Amino acid sequence: MKDEPLTIEALRNRLDQVEESIQNSISVTSACTNEWCESAEAVIDELTDAIYSLNVPRWADQEQSTRVKTLKKKAREVYAKYIQASEYPPRSLYGQAFCNDSKY
């Protein structure tokens, strides 16, 4: 993520890559090891922090606002897939809050 500028599209692309990795690990049951889960959660947390730090200014147009809201929703969906694929409880505060929210 450090090689490309921090844009909404860059965040979306990275989130898509993480989602694909999670999907692949679901299909191979031995892939979701403790090491993989720690690594995946760290990447998801980093992306989620970046995504949720995006604030849409009041003067922004509706399209920009919608893109940010859609990206935040996608982050929640990817985290839900990670939780379903993982045999381990989340380690991060975001992951624990997400599980306590129990909307996934």
Image (cartoon, rainbow, N blue to C red):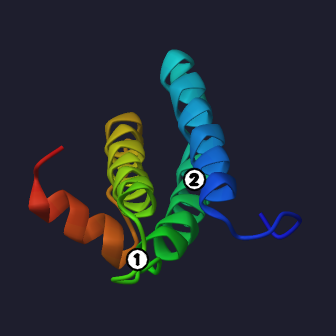
Q: What element carries label 1?
A: loop
CB contact under 8 Å: marks 2 and 1 = no
Q: Position of residue 10 (x, y in %)?
A: 69, 56
**Which one is in front in this view, the residue at disc 2 or the one at disc 1?**
1
Q: Work out whether 86 lies above or below 100.
A: above
Bin the neighbour count of mark 1 within 10 Å (Cα to Cα): few under 14, some 14-19, many 20 and up: some
Q: How many marks?
A: 2
- Disc 2 and disc 1: Cα gap in Å? 27 Å
Residue in the picture at 40% in, 46% down? 74
**Residue drawn at the location 47% of the way across and 66% of the way down:** 48
Q: Which residue does the image show at 39% across and 69% down from the upper left?
A: 91
What percent of the width, then of the height, locates residue 20? Answer: 59, 31
Q: Identify the mark nearer the N-term, 2 or 1.
A: 2
On the image, which quarter does residue 17 sit in? top right
Above-or-below relation of 97 to 12: below
Question: SS of the residue at dot 2?
Answer: helix
Residue 79 lies, in percent from the top left, at 38, 50
Residue situated furthest top in the rendering: 27
Above or below, comparing residue 64 to residue 25 in the picture? below
Disc 2 marks a residue whose amino acid type is Ala
Q: In which quarter of the image is the C terminus?
A: top left
Front residue of 14 and 70: 70
The one nearer the camera, 4 or 64, is 64
List the residue tagged with mark 1: 56
Q: To which residue does mark 2 refer?
A: 40
Tag on residue 24?
Answer: none
Instruction: Name the quadrant containing residue 60.
Output: bottom left
Q: Residues within 10 Å of mark 2 (few under 14, many from 20)?
A: many
The amino acid beneath tag 1 is Val
Quadrant for the N terminus, please.
Answer: bottom right
